[in-house]
Image (spheres, helix red, strand yellow):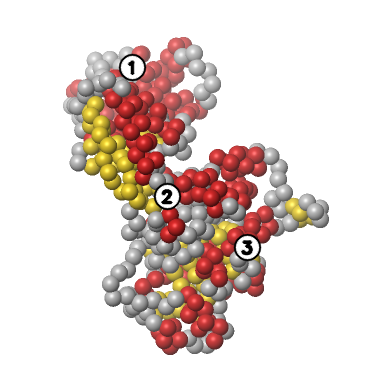
């Protein structure tokens, strides 16, 4: 440590001094004392760290009162902010795992607010006046839409897969094709989940080709379940072969074995009608005869995070009675959001227009182009020669591990500001309120208008105007 550092450390005041300054100069009185003290201590610790690192400080001769109060106020404001914040998704990834996945429809959000802020019949049968089941509010409509005999919901699809395996195959063998041993985000792997469930994995076939005799040849007295996993997060092309669910169900019936299908990102809509690659729907999977079908509620379904289990009544009832189910159950807010989302699926056209995920996935390029033109025109009206903005053609992604090969034609607005790198613009946009998350291409900050909502255009313009004012 040199003499300059020692001198600066001696001049650094204590917490009590800054606290006294705050009480004397700040009109804000609603900051909790504990937050204020912690913020001041954090501020002084950061200054001390910078001194020891040899960083240049704003005032190296004395730590003035104004500087100390300014830095403490910044720390206080940071502490008082919510960590979970609204973000403008300009990435073009519709079901963005890191940005909260699916957006809830406005009508669904209103229903959640009402249910969560008031008492509800979560586990109370209003007709009988006695304790009821929390599954009852969604089971009937899930069965109505999917065609299944029974249904239940847990916290996410990983939980749905785990609970189903633990119930149906604990201590016994589950047969699954090697080509379906998927891993999704967060290192969720089918073999690992199966091991935790107590079931024993029996791999059959090869990575790219599996045939019906492979399944039949692996069946023995210890076999409890035939499992088929939809490879929704990757695609295998070329010299490939897999056994259809219908044929696997027929094999299961021959040997009196249940068949389970994990759809991953399940959906109730045939997207091929809207120019999107075909994905097996929940209805098709149930109709093919699967005893248990599991899928997510917050991906292509467009609802809240949930793991949905539908299928034959005897299998689902067994899963419901598993004591582990209590550790995976969902709360009233998730149930309210899921039920309200499912109600929209009773009319497909209404679902497409009201559920943001479906609306963004099926959005016509013309509408996206018009949205891009509106943003471009508003940016040009700022009249700043340092700002360059252009419209480019690009591709959006479905996201959430679904349809990895699907490219959705889109329009983006790309900006460049003289004197600022694309990385710098990207950082400032992310640090804005609300945060605006885009992507960087060819030293341009790019915003995909497929995932930008109409009311968010003004937010983007306002943020870029502030950047120009401060640049």
Q: Say which element carries label 2.
A: helix
First in sequence: mark 1 vs mark 3: 1
Query: Which of the two discs, 2 and 3, sits closer to the camera?
Result: 2
Residue tagged 3? 143
Crowd class of label 3 (few under 14; some 14 to 19; many from 20; radius 10 Å): some
Q: Disc 2 and disc 3: Cα gap in Å?
A: 25 Å
Residue 35 shows up from this direction: yes
Left or right of 342? Residue 54 is left
Q: Nearer the viewer, residue 426 or 449?
A: 449
Q: Residue at image x 47%, y 34%?
A: 82
First in sequence: mark 2 vs mark 3: 3
Q: Disc 1 and disc 2: Cα gap in Å?
A: 50 Å
First in sequence: mark 1 vs mark 2: 1
Q: Disc 1 and disc 3: Cα gap in Å?
A: 63 Å
Crowd class of label 2 (few under 14; some 14 to 19; many from 20; radius 10 Å): many
Q: Residue at image x 26%, y 29%?
A: 50
Left or right of 212? Residue 239 is left
Residue occupying the far right of the picture: 128
Residue tagged 1? 67
Q: Residue at image x 34%, y 36%?
A: 372
Relative height, residue 417 to residue 400 (above, below): above
Q: Position of residue 237 (x, y in %)?
A: 30, 69
Q: Residue at image x 51%, y 45%?
A: 353
Residue tagged 2? 361
Q: Are marks 1 and 2 in contact (CB under 8 Å)?
A: no
- How many marks the image carries: the answer is 3
Query: Which of the two discs, 1 and 3, sits closer to the camera?
Result: 3
Residue 290 shows up from this direction: no
**Image-quadrant location for residue 414:** top left
Q: Nearer the viewer, residue 27 or 1?
A: 27
The label number, if any, that marks residue 13 in the structure image? none
């Amino acid at each position: 440590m040199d003499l300059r550092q020692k001198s600066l450390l001696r001049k650094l005041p204590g917490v009590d001094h800054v606290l006294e300054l705050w009480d004397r100069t700040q009109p804000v009185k609603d900051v909790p004392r504990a937050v204020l003290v912690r913020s001041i201590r954090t501020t002084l610790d950061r200054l001390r760290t910078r001194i020891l690192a040899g960083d240049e400080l704003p005032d190296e001769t004395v730590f003035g009162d104004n500087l100390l109060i300014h830095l403490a106020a910044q720390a206080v404001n940071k502490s008082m902010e919510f960590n979970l914040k609204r973000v403008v998704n300009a990435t073009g990834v519709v079901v963005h795992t890191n940005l909260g996945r699916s957006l809830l429809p406005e009508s669904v959000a209103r229903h959640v607010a009402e249910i969560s802020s008031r008492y509800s019949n979560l586990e109370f049968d209003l007709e009988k006046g006695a304790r009821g089941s929390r599954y009852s509010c969604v089971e009937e409509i899930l069965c109505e839409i999917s065609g299944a005999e029974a249904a239940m919901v847990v916290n996410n699809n990983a939980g749905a897969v785990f609970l189903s395996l633990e119930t149906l195959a604990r201590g016994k063998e589950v047969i699954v094709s090697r080509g379906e041993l998927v891993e999704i985000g967060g290192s969720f792997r089918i073999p690992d989940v199966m091991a935790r469930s107590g079931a024993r994995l029996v791999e059959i076939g090869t990575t790219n080709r599996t045939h019906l005799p492979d399944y039949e040849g692996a069946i023995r007295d210890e076999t409890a379940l035939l499992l088929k996993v939809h490879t929704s997060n990757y695609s295998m092309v070329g010299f490939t072969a897999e056994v259809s669910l219908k044929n696997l169900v027929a094999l299961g019936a021959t040997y009196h074995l249940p068949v389970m299908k994990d759809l991953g990102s399940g959906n109730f809509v045939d997207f091929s009608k809207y120019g999107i690659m075909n994905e097996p729907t929940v209805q098709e999977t149930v109709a093919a005869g699967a005893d248990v079908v599991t899928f997510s509620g917050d991906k292509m379904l467009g609802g809240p995070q949930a793991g949905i289990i539908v299928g034959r009544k005897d299998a689902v009832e067994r899963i419901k009675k598993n004591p582990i189910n209590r550790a995976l159950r969902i709360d009233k807010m998730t149930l309210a959001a899921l039920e309200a989302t499912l109600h929209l699926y009773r009319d497909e056209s209404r679902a497409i227009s009201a559920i943001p995920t479906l609306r963004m996935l099926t959005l016509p390029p013309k509408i996206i182009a018009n949205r891009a033109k509106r943003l471009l025109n508003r940016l040009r009206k700022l009249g700043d020669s340092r700002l360059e903005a252009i419209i480019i053609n690009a591709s959006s992604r479905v996201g959430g591990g679904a349809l990895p090969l699907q490219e959705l034609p889109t329009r983006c607005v790309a900006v460049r500001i003289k004197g600022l790198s694309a990385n710098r613009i990207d950082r400032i946009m992310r640090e804005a309120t609300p945060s605006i998350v885009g992507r960087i291409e060819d030293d341009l900050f790019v915003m995909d208008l497929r995932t930008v909502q109409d009311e968010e255009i003004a937010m983007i313009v306002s943020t870029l105007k502030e950047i120009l004012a401060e640049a």
